[in-house]
Image (cartoon, coloured by chain):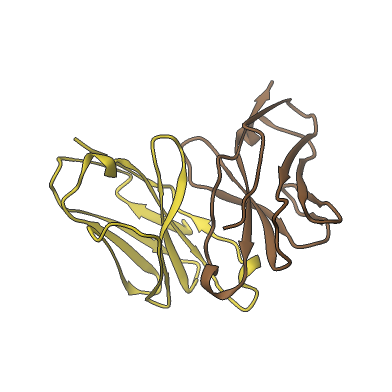
């Protein structure tokens, strides 16, 4: 009964390809996120969706397009993959209530993307 | 985004207490102090958070300075499983930054048997 799951765990692909990473949470949360952790281990937020609506887009290239079919899922589609997209991508979820500053985020296990 | 400063690395022996410091001199009145940790090859994991008062949970304790410009995460008895990168993060509950977690470099904790 994994709380936040991602598929695939590993993804190796060629430059220029299009790929998707899927994320599902079974915690009943209303907000989901994508983070990117680069080779230097720096973890940075990319997107946030609340009730299927985009609320944060941290200046991510438009080759990255998140899609939220429902509150439990947030997928990340990446077009025209570049070498610099190689990283570990983490999905997370939280329940953003009245006390937004105190809400905690639950992270998935990560998807390691390698672009050759 | 408000900044935090942590030591790059710390070491501890197993079963000894560990005090992980964090400076956040520009903290605002609405910033919560969150701590997350990342075990090797895993996603970040919530540890504890607080606003003004010290906090305890089953994982750790959080001691917050009276002026809130610094805080300390306390692991009462370090185990090998506590070896991880520990992140101190300020989280603002106000509108435009709602939901954002800005991770710094964190502190790499090494626990020796």
Q: Residue at x 72, y 45 (%)?
A: B23
Q: Residue at x 55, y 38 (%)?
A: B39
In the rendered structure, the answer to whether residue B27 lies left or right of residue A108 reads: right
Question: Seen from this angle, which residue lies furthest top?
Answer: B113
**Could you tell me which quadrant the C terminus of chain A lies in?**
top left
In the rendered structure, the answer to whether residue A73 lies left or right of residue A115 reads: right
Q: Residue at x 43, y 47 (%)?
A: A109
Q: Which quadrant of the view contains residue B13?
A: top right
Q: Residue at x 68, y 63 (%)?
A: B31
Give x and y (percent) for residue B15.
77, 29
Q: Which chain is brown?
A: B
Question: Seen from this angle, which residue lies furthest front?
Answer: B26
In depth, the one of A50 and A57 nearer the eye is A57
Give x and y (percent) for residue B28.
70, 63
In depth, the one of A72 and B63 nearer the eye is B63
Q: Which quadrant of the view contains residue A104?
A: bottom right
Residue B92 vs A53, above or below: the answer is above
How many numbered circles does the render carry?
0
Residue B95 vs A35, above or below: the answer is below
Give x and y (percent) for residue B67.
83, 56
Give x and y (percent) for residue A49.
41, 70
Colour used to depict chain A in the structure image: yellow
Question: Seen from this angle, which residue lies furthest right?
Answer: B66
């Amino acid at each position: 009964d994994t709380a936040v799951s991602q598929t695939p765990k590993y993804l190796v692909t060629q430059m220029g390809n299009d790929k998707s990473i899927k994320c599902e949470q079974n915690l009943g949360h209303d907000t989901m996120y994508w983070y990117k952790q680069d080779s230097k281990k720096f973890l940075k937020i990319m997107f946030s969706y609340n009730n299927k609506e985009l609320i944060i887009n941290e200046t991510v290239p438009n080759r990255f397009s998140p899609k939220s079919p429902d509150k439990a899922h947030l997928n990340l589609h990446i077009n025209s993959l570049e070498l610099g997209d190689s990283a570990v991508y983490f999905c997370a979820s939280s329940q953003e209530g009245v006390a937004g500053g105190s809400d905690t985020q639950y992270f998935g296990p990560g998807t390691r993307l390698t672009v050759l | 985004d408000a900044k935090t400063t942590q030591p790059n690395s710390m070491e501890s022996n197993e079963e000894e207490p560990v005090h992980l410091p964090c400076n956040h001199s520009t903290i605002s009145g609405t910033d919560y102090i969150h701590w997350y940790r990342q075990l090797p090859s895993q996603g970040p994991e919530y540890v504890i958070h607080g606003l003004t008062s010290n906090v305890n949970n089953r994982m750790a304790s959080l001691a917050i300075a009276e002026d809130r410009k610094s805080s300390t995460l306390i692991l009462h008895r370090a185990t090998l499983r506590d070896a991880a990168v520990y992140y101190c993060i300020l989280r603002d509950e106000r509108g435009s930054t709602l939901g954002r977690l800005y991770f710094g470099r964190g502190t790499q904790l090494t626990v020796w048997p």
